[in-house]
Amino acid sequence: MIDDLCAVVDELTSDPSNAWARDLGYRPVWAGSPASRIAIIGQAPGRRAQESGIPWDDASGVRLRSWLGVRDEEFYDPSLFAIVPMDFYFPGKGKTGDLPPRKEFAPRWHPQILSRMPHITLRVLIGAHAQRYYLKGRSEATLTQTVRSYCDYLPAEFPLVHPSPLNYRWHVKNSWFTAEVVPELARRVSIALGRG
């Protein structure tokens, strides 16, 4: 099955829709294997991740791993975690931050990739783009309401706010997240990894 997964990513890389990324020397930023148990589905890699090839290799990733209750070596072990963003390439900068992921990317490639990861029991949906796609009309009116209603999506999905340090105002306003949601996330991750 690893050969099948690699073949899909090779097809993705060579697809004409990604010619612009190849021209820039970009490689798809993702991780995973047929043994992966948890899928981390975020927006798209930032510039730093695109340059290093290492997803979540920044302050946001440090915070995310603390929320998940895992060490770096566990997070980057593809037999445990698949990192499957809504677009595998840095989309560029906009006026207020990174541009959003391309809308056509996930519908085309995620089913092919995730179908080759049959042991995934938990999808962590980070941010509005991932939540809109995977919750398919089941999300609440706002991201905050969706995250607060996380129990409604268990056991298969767990919606999260982005762990960026820039979201500090959101955390000040929503102290329930750290008190209630983070411990339950870590517990669900532990279960999915077979720890208890």
Image: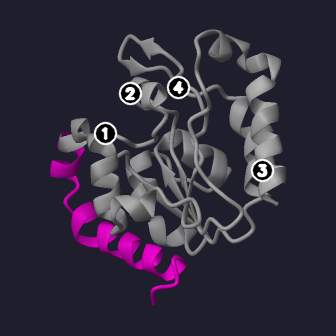
Secondary structure beneath label 4: loop
The circle drawn on residue 100 is: 4
- Residue 192 location (% of width, % of height): 53, 77
Q: Residue 111: in sight, yes or no?
A: no
Q: How crowded is mark 4: few (under 14 residues within 10 Å), some or many (20 or more)?
A: some
Q: Are marks 1 and 3 in contact (CB under 8 Å)?
A: no
CA separation in Å, label 1 and label 4? 19 Å
**Which residue is under mark 1?**
58
The circle drawn on residue 23 is: none
Q: Residue at x 43, y 31 (%)?
A: 52
Q: Is residue 180 magenta?
A: yes
Mark 3: amino acid: Leu
- Residue 114 location (% of width, % of height): 73, 55
User: In terms of sequence position, does the residue under pointer 1 or pointer 3 come before the other?
Assistant: 3
Which mark's residue is nearer the viewer, 1 or 3?
A: 3
Q: How crowded is mark 2: few (under 14 residues within 10 Å), some or many (20 or more)?
A: some
User: In terms of sequence position, does the residue under pointer 1 or pointer 4 come before the other?
Assistant: 1
Q: Is the magenta stretch mostly helix, strand or loop?
A: helix
User: In terms of sequence position, does the residue under pointer 3 or pointer 4 come before the other?
Assistant: 3
The answer to which image quadrant residue 166 occupies is: top left
Residue at far bottom of view = 196
Which mark's residue is nearer the viewer, 3 or 4?
A: 3
**Which residue is under mark 2?**
48
Q: Are marks 2 and 1 in contact (CB under 8 Å)?
A: yes
- Residue 85 location (% of width, % of height): 57, 41
CA separation in Å, label 3 and label 4? 25 Å
User: Of residues 5 and 42, which is closer to you in this image?
Assistant: 5
Q: Work out whether 47 lies above or below 166.
A: above
**Which residue is under mark 3?**
5
Q: Residue at x 38, y 49 (%)?
A: 161
Secondary structure beneath label 1: loop
Which segment is the magenta one?
A: 169-196
